[in-house]
């Protein structure tokens, strides 16, 4: 089933994948936001990852307009990968069942891909809102890499990215799953999202994607809304989430040994930043020894004055 039977042939086709686990209350909002796209999705694939709520009933309202697949609970990465296996569009886009797209989410990327079909991936901005709908900020404004890109390309509707920019992108973790678009064939070649990582799976794929890329871009427009809830894994179990995050990032080391210098440099910077996040999480839990252990490796792998200062701050307990 496809939605885009009347799309211009010179525009890329998009498969939009929506993983869902017990988000029946918000699933319709996510689906409606994709159906409202000014550049129609080629298909909308909802992967129900073992939900026990009314997800199936909500999905049935859209029979004929979405592809709905139920699977035993296996985690968000497995759900997204299943969507990729079913996808037939040329490009992939993702939105979680509790988030939503802006109406021009796909169009802004499709227009650029039409003009430059050799792009490896595209990014954009997003807004963050709390459960009451209060605006908490925007992704680019909260990102050092985003601010530097805007400073170098003021008033630009399209910000091109080359390999020299990749260090800053990776080091700052400049990626959000709701705003990234990339070719399905590249996703297949990279092996999709990593299984077994509950936190950091998005960044894990993004770093591998950047390492496999030469040309990309950023549309500095808000194309999605990320709804932040207090029940997220990061808030329910901060120590466990931090440990899962660093494990995910550390697992990339053998995969990046042959990567370009900017990618390697960005990875070292990001790994140190994640170690610092873990260390401060340990400190807040009263585990100073674990905090120091978390960052000691950076002294040898990311030797610079800032690293020394960071490690000393952890050792002092703040």
Image (cartoon, grey):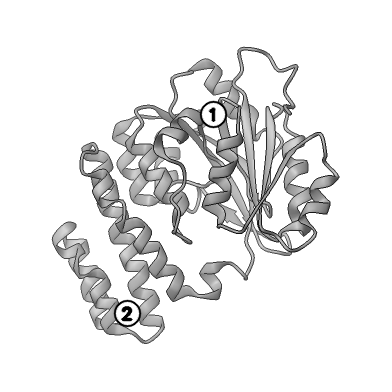
Does any portion of residue 296 appear in the rendered image? yes
The residue lying at 33 percent from left, 84 percent from top is 287
Please provide percent x and percent y for residue 42: 68, 27
The residue furthest top is 9
The foreground one among 2 and 37 is 2
Q: Quadrant of the N terminus?
A: top right
Residue plotted at (61% across, 18% down): 11
* x then y, percent, for residue 254: 24, 49
Counting residues from the start of the chain, the first of labels 2 and 1 encountered is 1
Tag 2's secondary structure? loop
Determine the image quadrant of residue 82: top right
Res. 147 in view: no
- Residue 101 is marked as none
Q: Residues within 10 Å of mark 1 (few under 14, many from 20)?
A: few
Residue at point 58%, 49% (across, down): 79
Q: Which residue is mark 1?
A: 157
Whether residue 236 is situated above or below residue 57 in the rendered picture: below
Q: Quadrant of residue 41?
A: top right
Query: In the image shown, does 8 or 165 lie closer to the viewer?
Result: 8
- Position in image of residue 202 (x %, y %): 47, 50
State whether residue 72 is above or below residue 190: below
Q: Residues within 10 Å of mark 2 (few under 14, many from 20)?
A: few
Vertically, is 137 above or below 183?
Answer: below
Q: Quadrant of the C terminus?
A: bottom left
Q: CA distance from mark 2 to mark 1?
A: 41 Å
Q: Taking 140 as reference, is 72 left or right?
A: right
Query: Considering only vertical position in the picture, is 220 above or below 205?
Result: above
Query: In x, y percent, where is residue 209?
Result: 39, 38
Report which quarter residue 5 is drawn in: top right
Q: Which residue does the numbered mark 2 point to in the structure image?
A: 318
148 left or right of 177 in image = left
């Amino acid at each position: 089933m496809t939605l885009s039977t009347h799309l211009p042939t010179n525009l890329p086709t998009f498969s939009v994948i929506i993983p869902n686990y017990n988000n029946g209350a918000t699933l319709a909002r996510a689906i409606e936001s994709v159906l409202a796209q000014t550049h129609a999705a080629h298909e909308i694939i909802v992967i129900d990852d073992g939900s026990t709520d009314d997800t199936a009933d909500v999905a049935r309202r859209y029979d004929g307009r979405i592809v709905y697949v139920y699977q035993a609970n296996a985690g968000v990465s497995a759900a997204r990968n299943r969507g990729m296996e079913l996808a037939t569009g040329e490009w992939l886009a993702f939105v979680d069942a509790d988030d939503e797209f802006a109406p021009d989410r796909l169009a802004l990327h499709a227009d650029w891909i039409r003009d430059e079909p050799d792009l490896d991936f595209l990014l954009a901005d997003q807004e963050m809102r709390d459960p009451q709908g209060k605006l908490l900020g925007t992704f680019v404004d909260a990102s050092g890499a985003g601010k530097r890109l805007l400073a170098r390309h003021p008033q630009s509707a399209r910000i091109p990215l080359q390999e020299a920019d990749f260090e800053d992108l990776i080091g700052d973790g400049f990626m959000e799953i709701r705003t990234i678009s990339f070719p399905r064939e590249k996703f297949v070649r990279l092996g999709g999202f990593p299984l077994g990582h509950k936190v950091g799976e998005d960044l894990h794929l993004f770093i591998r994607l950047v390492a496999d890329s030469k040309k990309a871009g950023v549309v500095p427009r808000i194309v999605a809304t990320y709804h932040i809830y207090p029940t997220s894994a990061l808030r329910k179990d901060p120590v466990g989430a931090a440990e899962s995050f660093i494990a995910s990032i550390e697992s990339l080391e053998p995969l990046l040994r042959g990567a370009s210098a900017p990618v390697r440099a960005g990875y070292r910077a990001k790994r140190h930043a994640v170690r610092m996040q873990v260390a401060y999480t340990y400190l807040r839990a009263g585990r100073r020894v674990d905090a120091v252990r978390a960052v000691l490796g950076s002294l040898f792998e990311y030797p610079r004055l800032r690293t020394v200062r960071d490690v000393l701050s952890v050792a002092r307990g703040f």
